[in-house]
């Protein structure tokens, strides 16, 4: 595979040199061995990006699972609170019932 890539790069450079059109080449210069070390690591950069994407996906799934667990706990707690509300004692029921006041209107009668 590297031979195929090397052949393709040589063919591309040959084409560019033939069709330079009065311009001068600035990259890659002849004798660009000092830049080769940077170009060798371009594949590892992609792998790191792919690995970081995988880590991000894993952390997203983990956050989603945690969120779902929290929602389930909240639902269970709400269910318990509702059942506790329904189990009120007698004293609470008595406090809620207020005696009704009877209002009597007084009329003034003049004799």
Image (spheres, rainbow, N blue to C red):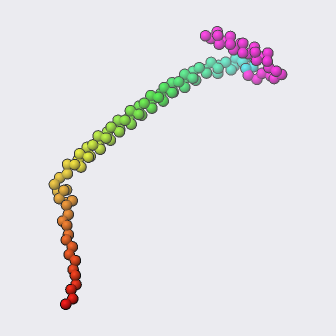
| Residue 15: image location, x then y, percent | 75, 15
Tell me what residue is drawn at x 39 percent, y 36 percent: 67
Q: Is residue 11 magenta?
A: yes
Q: Residue most toward the right?
A: 22
* Number of numbered markers: 0
- Residue 3 percent coordinates (x, y): 64, 9
Q: Quadrant of the C terminus?
A: bottom left
Q: Residue at x 42, y 34 (%)?
A: 63
Whether residue 90 is in magenta: the answer is: no
Q: Is residue 102 above or below residue 2?
A: below
Which range is magenta? 1-27
Q: Quadrant of residue 39?
A: top right
* Residue most extreme to the top: 3
Name the residue at 51% across, 27% down: 53
Q: Nearer the viewer, residue 83 or 10?
A: 83
Above or below, comparing residue 23 to residue 66 in the picture: above
In this rendering, the answer to whether 20 lies above or below 72 is above
Q: Does residue 67 appear left or right of residue 9 in this picture?
A: left
Q: Quadrant of residue 108?
A: bottom left
Q: Quadrant of the N terminus?
A: top right
Q: Is residue 76 left or right of residue 17?
A: left
Q: Quadrant of residue 18?
A: top right
């Amino acid at each position: 595979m590297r031979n195929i890539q090397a052949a393709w790069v040589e063919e591309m450079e040959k084409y560019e040199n033939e069709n330079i059109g009065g311009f001068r080449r600035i990259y890659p210069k002849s004798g660009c061995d000092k830049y080769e070390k940077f170009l060798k690591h371009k594949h590892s950069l992609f792998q790191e990006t792919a690995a970081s994407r995988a880590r991000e996906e894993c952390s997203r799934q983990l956050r989603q699972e945690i969120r779902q667990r929290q929602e389930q706990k909240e639902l269970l707690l709400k269910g318990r609170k509702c059942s506790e509300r329904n189990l009120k004692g007698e004293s609470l029921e008595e406090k809620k019932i207020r005696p009704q006041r009877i209002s009597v209107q007084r009329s003034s009668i003049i004799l």
